[in-house]
Image: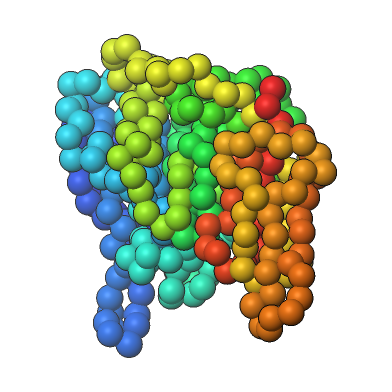
């Protein structure tokens, strides 16, 4: 098996606080013998569980990087029992360009797992996580939001798994995150996702969607900060009392593909429902206006199930194949 070219000065077995980089050699027009330098921090104090915390899997999602850069800069080692590995922006080229995917190879990191050690930059990052970082972890937390193209209710999520003990552990951890919404999430293309890779290794995994629209808010950043601390307490790595959400979480479920509403027209979105609104199957949820000419009626889109609107397309211009919105059952 080919060795991964990423190197780091971080000693993963050494106690203390370490700040450094994952150094990925990359020869480009602007730097012949250059490297992609991905910031990493490790906090380790004695024996105990390991948490792997990541943000920036997609480069236009900012709650994760904000919460994790903040954590790496202020966490005290005496508060730790075990190990915390923090990578605030795992897809660092995409993060720097403020895009969902890397401008270097145009590959979506969250659809590149398990990766390739001799592949493109994104594939090499995926391989390093698959073979080096994830195997060390007991708890893996990957913080997402909607990026530039989606708006999401702030939820923590887990998945349906064949191993029901593992599924219960993931669900308990997602609940401990204490987001306003708790989702049992369905993925349309899970095969090459980071989530699937982590879960296939038997790890406890939590993901989130916290807002979107290409920016962050004080509200969503606070949810991310609070959630990360709560999960470290839940894992027994940090001592203290968890901070609950001000109100009990609303439990949601995506039992099948009827939760997703795909757009079959290009045009201007006229929303008829908003995030957090409850709908019935058959309700009008959006109209798509023809923007190529006047004189035509808008295309109407209807809910395919009862439930709550949890995700919607953020830009007002939509294209064929875009996800218009997501409706989850309230349970």
Nearer to the camera, 295 or 128: 295
Closest to the observer: 237 or 73?
Answer: 73
Pick whichever, 265 or 159, lies toward us: 265
In the image, residue 268 sits, relative to residue 239, either above or below, namely below
**Where residue 146 sits in the image (x, y, percent)?**
50, 51
What is the quadrant of the C terminus in the image?
top right
Say whether residue 245 is visible: yes
Q: Position of residue 9 (x, y in %)?
A: 24, 52
Q: From the viewer's perspective, is residue 83 above or below residue 61?
A: above
User: Quick check: 36 left or right of 196?
Assistant: left
Q: Is residue 33 left or right of residue 264?
A: left
Q: Quadrant of the N terminus?
A: bottom right
* Residue found at the far front of this picture: 295
Q: Residue at x 61, y 36 (%)?
A: 277
Where residue 44 sits, quadrant-wise, is top left
Horizontally, is 15 left or right of 297 in the view?
Answer: left
């Amino acid at each position: 098996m080919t060795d991964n070219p990423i190197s780091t000065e971080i000693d993963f077995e050494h106690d203390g606080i370490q700040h450094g980089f994952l150094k990925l050699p990359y020869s480009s027009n602007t730097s012949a013998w250059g490297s992609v330098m991905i910031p990493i921090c490790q906090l380790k104090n004695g024996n105990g569980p390991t948490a792997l915390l990541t943000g920036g899997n997609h480069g236009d999602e900012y709650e994760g990087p904000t919460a994790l850069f903040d954590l790496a800069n202020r966490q005290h080692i005496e508060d730790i029992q075990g190990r915390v590995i923090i990578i605030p922006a795992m897809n660092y080229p995409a993060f720097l360009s403020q895009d969902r995917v890397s401008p270097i190879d145009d590959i979506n990191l969250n659809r590149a797992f398990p990766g390739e050690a001799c592949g493109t930059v994104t594939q090499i990052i995926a391989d390093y996580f698959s073979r080096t970082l994830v195997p060390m972890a007991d708890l893996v937390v990957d913080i997402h939001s909607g990026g530039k193209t989606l708006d999401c209710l702030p939820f923590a999520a887990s998945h349906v798994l064949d191993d029901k003990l593992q599924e219960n552990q993931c669900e308990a951890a997602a609940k401990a995150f204490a987001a306003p919404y708790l989702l049992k999430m369905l993925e349309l293309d899970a095969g090459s996702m980071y989530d699937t890779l982590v879960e296939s290794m038997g790890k406890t995994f939590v993901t989130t969607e916290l807002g979107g629209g290409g920016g962050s808010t004080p509200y969503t950043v606070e949810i991310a900060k609070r959630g990360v601390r709560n999960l470290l307490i839940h894992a027994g790595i940090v001592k203290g009392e968890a901070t609950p959400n001000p109100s009990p979480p609303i439990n949601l479920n995506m039992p099948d593909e009827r939760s997703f509403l795909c757009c079959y027209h290009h045009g201007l979105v006229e929303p008829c429902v908003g995030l957090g609104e409850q709908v019935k199957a058959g309700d009008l949820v959006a109209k798509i206006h023809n923007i190529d000419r006047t004189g035509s009626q808008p295309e109407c889109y209807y809910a395919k199930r009862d439930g709550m609107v949890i995700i919607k397309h953020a830009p007002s211009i939509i294209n064929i194949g875009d996800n218009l919105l997501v409706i989850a059952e309230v349970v």
